[in-house]
Amino acid sequence: MDVNTLIARRLKALRDAQNWSLDALAERSKVSRSNISLIERGQSSPTATVLDKLATALNVPLAALFEQDDAPAAETSPVSRAADQTVWTDPGSGYVRRHLSPTARSAIQLVEVDFPAGQRVSYETGARDADIHQQIWMLEGAMEITVGDTSWRLKPGDCLAMRLDSPNVFRNPTRKRARYLVALTTFAVNERSNG
DNA sequence: CCACACTTGGCGCCTTATAC
DNA sequence: GTATAAGGCGCCAAGTGTGG
């Protein structure tokens, strides 16, 4: 399936699960209603920044928008083959995400990222009703990661633990691409009963 | 000839506004 | 909820200029 179609379905499903209208999600996420409609119909290729705004409003990690939701039970396997993994390219920065973990509901999710030289992505992540932790393990090249007011420069072998509760920036200040692994977990802190 | 810097124009994302 | 138009913005490739 085409990645934009996958994102479109997931976004619609998550919005329906909250029973929110386009307007309701637009207001919470600060993404325009027109754009959300385009994304849900697969007629736009959203940037990572926009997807993160939507995911934050929906109280899920960005990775939740790339889950394969309709796999028949018979096809559910503890192994996700390289050829079957969802790969997505951010049209804004050109960074490539590969979603490694086989099942959507696993406690741990792994994502491999290939980040072009000189590029930068900022996430205006705010508070969610879910506690999302992630660790960044540098494999190749270098990245400068800013969480809130603090920034770190990561080199191969370095591992940064962070919580997704404040704005953060991923930047590759070098002339070479960078590659890193992201491991993330989600703890549901409470249920939002009425929005 | 080459290497580099700058401009130009096109394209895609995203917005607001409007109409249906 | 869908569809369209207009405009801002940033990226990128092609073209042009400059100095070696």
Image (tube, coloured by chain):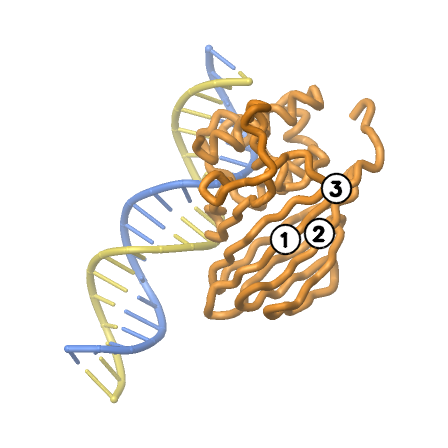
Chain colours: A orange, B blue, C yellow
Residue placed at 49% from the left, 53% from the top? Answer: A95
Q: Label 3 to label 2, Cα distance in Å?
A: 9 Å
Where does the image place residue A132, in percent across and percent down from the top left? 75, 45
| Residue A159 appears in the figure | yes
Residue placed at 84% from the left, 33% from the top? Answer: A190
Residue nearer the viewer, A118 or A5: A5
- The residue wearing badge 1 is A182
**Chain under disc 2:** A
Residue nearer the viewer, A174 or B19: A174
Crowding around mark 2 (Cα neighbors within 10 Å: few <14, some 14 to 19, many 20+) is: some
- Is label 3 on the same chain as label 2? yes
Q: Label 1 to label 3, Cα distance in Å?
A: 13 Å
Crowding around mark 3 (Cα neighbors within 10 Å: few <14, some 14 to 19, many 20+) is: some
Image quadrant assignment for residue B15: top right
Residue placed at 78% from the left, 26% from the top? Answer: A195
- The residue wearing badge 2 is A134
Position of C2 relative to A153 (above/below): above
Residue type (three-letter) at the residue carrying disc 2 = Gln
Position of A116 relative to B14 (above/below): below
- The residue wearing badge 3 is A186
Position of A155 relative to A189 (above/below): below
Where does the image place residue A192, in percent across and percent down from the top left? 81, 28
**Chain under disc 3:** A
Residue type (three-letter) at the residue carrying disc 1 = Val
Mark toward the start of the polypeptide (1 vs 2): 2
Image quadrant assignment for residue A152: bottom right
Where does the image place residue A176, in percent across and percent down from the top left? 46, 68
Residues at discs 1 and 3 in contact (Cβ within 8 Å): no
Residue type (three-letter) at the residue carrying disc 3 = Thr
- The extreme right residue here reads A190
**Chain under disc 1:** A
Quick one: quadrant of the N terminus of chain A?
A: top left
